[in-house]
Image (cartoon, helix red, strand yellow):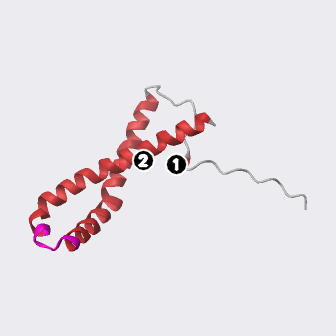
Amino acid sequence: MKTQLNHSLMARLKKTTRIWIAVYPTVLVFLTIFGDAIRELPLALGIFVSTLIVVIIVSNVTEPLVGKAFYHLGSIFRKAGHTCATTPLENNAAPAERSAQSDN
């Protein structure tokens, strides 16, 4: 149980780091290019437009690229012999409990 919890926390930390690495440069580039135009809009509208564009770019472009980079880095470490003692959980989810067989 403790190993599962530690592994789950590490998986969430990796996911959070991966998303932050995708979001930071996207926001930086977006504000560098469109920052002056966004400042001229009313605050709520500027935030709406910014988040709309950034979320679309992050979810469809930068996060998948960062995910691929993490995968390749992981394969490099696995080849070098740095393996984890436990099996990673898929999609950061706890394993499903097996239901008891029905007697019918």
- Residue identifier under label 1: 92
Which element type, helix, strand or loop, lies under badge 2? Answer: helix
Do we see residue 41 in this rendering?
Answer: yes
Quadrant assignment for the N terminus = top right
Residue nearest the observer in this picture, 103 or 72: 103
Decide whether residue 13 is among the magenta residues. Answer: no
Residue appearing at x 40%, y 33% in the figure: 76
Q: Residue furthest top?
A: 81
Describe residue 35's horizontal placement relative to residue 66 as left or right: left
**Where does the magenta region start and end?**
38-44
Residue 17: name its quadrant: top left
- At label 2, the amino acid type is Lys
How far across and down, in percent of the image, does residue 102 sit? 86, 58
How crowded is the residue under tag 1: few (<14 C-alpha within 10 Å), some, or many (20+)?
A: some
Residue in the image at 42% along x and 47% along y: 15
Disc 2: CA contacts within 10 A as few (<14), some (14-19) or many (>=20): some
Q: Is residue 77 above or below residue 62?
A: above
Above or below for 33 versus 79: below
Q: What's the CA distance linking mark 1 and mark 2?
A: 8 Å
Vertically, is 80 above or below 32? above
Query: Is 63 in front, or is 77?
Result: 63
Residue identifier under label 2:
15
Res 49 → quadrant? bottom left
Nearer to us in this view, 51 or 102: 51
- State which tag comes first along the sequence, 1 or 2: 2
Q: Secondary structure at mark 1?
A: helix
- Residue at 9% x, 65% y is 36
> What residue type is disc 1 on?
Asn
Instruction: Give how far across and how far down residue 42 sits, in percent.
Output: 16, 74
The quadrant where residue 77 appears: top left
Observer-nearest of 67 and 38:
38
